[in-house]
Structures are given as C-alpha cells and as structure tokens.
Image (cartoon, rainbow, N blue to C red):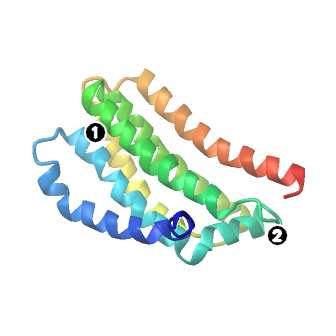
Amino acid sequence: MLNRIIVNWVYGGFMAGLLLLALMPLLTASWPTALTATFVLLPVYMLHQYEEHDHDRFRLFFNATIGKGRDVLSPTAVFITNVPGVWGVICMSLYLAAEVNVGWAFIAVYLVLVNAFVHLIHAFVFRGYNPGLGTALALFIPAGAYALRQVENAEGGTPVFQAIGLVMAIAIHAAILLHVRRRLRVGH
C-alpha cells in the first residue's frame, strides 16, 4: 500500500489543492492578509506538482537530463521531496508564522520563488520546456511575489526572517542536488 501512495501521491495532492482553494475563503476569512497569501502557496504548489509529476514526467525528465540517463531520482526520493519536503515545510512555515512570528512565512514564500527560478534556469540551460515550467511561470511567480510583499509589509516580516527563508529554500533545493550528485558518484 505504501508503494501505491509513493507512486500516486500527486493525484491526491492535485485534488486536495483544488479543495483547499475552494475552502480558502472560509478557512482564512479572519486571517491577516500575509497568512492568507502564504496559505494559498500550498494549494498552488499542489497544482504545480500535478503539471510536474503526472505520469512521472519530472523524474523521467530529470533522470534523462541531469542524470544523463541514469536513475538518480527514485519514486521514493520524489515522494520525500514533495510531500514532507514541500507540503510539510509549507505547513510548518504557516504554523510558525501564525503562532510565533509572521516572518517564518518567508520559508514558504521563498520555497515557491526559488523553485520557479530553478525551473527558469533549467529552461534556459536546456533551451526548452521542463515539467512544471508552465505553472512556475503562471502561478508561482505572481502568487509568490504577492505573498512576499504581504509578508514584507506585515509586522515581523524582517530582513532577518527573509534571509532565513531564502537560505532554507535554497538548502532544500541544494539537498536534492547533493542527493543526485551522490547517486551519480556511486553509480546508482
């Protein structure tokens, strides 16, 4: 059963993303704008993940381009990256922003913006489409920019928290590349 979840997580995520967007006006009605803008990043990310991972597109594309035909990203690695590594991180960021300091929302904001930047760089380097590029451009950039402005303008949205959010988002993306580099080195 766990293997079916690992292989098919993206379809449940897509449906959950649509449901969260539909429920958002009810769930966030009394929230500050910065938290609402951060919350929307989760369902937006889930929609992005559908473009990216439907029919295992991203993993196959990544293994063909970055892995040079080698299986450097497994279905389990993709699952861990996207479910705890994205959904869990955005959830944690929201809880910390709501309960401790709104500046913790920068983690979610920069996770989205750094991912959009990575898709753009990949498109430039490989001179073409990569799975997820469309929603990175159409959803991540406007939603991420709006959330960035809202959190910056909120009390507690300080440059220190911006730096923490940016460093964490880059570290998450770098961890994926380190995993791939290790897999390439050991010949898996």
Mark 2 and mark 1 lie on one chain; the one further toward the N terminus is 2
Please tell me which residue is depicted at 47% across the width and 67% down the height of the picture: 10
Residue 15's tag is none
x then y, percent, for residue 45? 42, 58
x then y, percent, for residue 149? 32, 40
**What element does badge 2 sit on?**
loop
x then y, percent, for residue 90? 40, 44
For residue 109, say whether it is visible: no
Of tags 2 and 1, the one toward the viewer is 2
Quarter of the image with the C terminus is: bottom right
Q: Which residue is mark 1?
A: 150
Query: For mark 1, does the 10 Å Cα neighbourhood hold few (<14), some (14 to 19), or many (20 or more) residues?
Result: many
Please tell me which residue is depicted at 61% across the width and 73% down the height of the picture: 57
Please tell me which residue is depicted at 25% across the width and 32% down the height of the picture: 98
Question: Mark 2 and mark 1: span between their CA atoms?
Answer: 42 Å
For residue 82, say whether it is visible: yes
Residue 6, image quadrant: bottom right
Note whether 46 is above or below 107 in the view shown.
Answer: below
Note whether 79 is above or below 35 in the view shown.
Answer: below
Amino acid residing under circle 2:
Gly
x then y, percent, for residue 66? 76, 61
In the image: residue 136, left or right of residue 33? right
In the image: residue 14, left or right of residue 130? left
**What element does badge 1 sit on?**
helix
Q: Which residue is mark 2?
A: 69
Residue contact at pointers 2 and 1, CB within 8 angstroms: no
| Number of numbered discs visible in the structure rendering | 2
Amino acid residing under circle 1:
Gln
Q: Residue furthest bottom?
A: 55
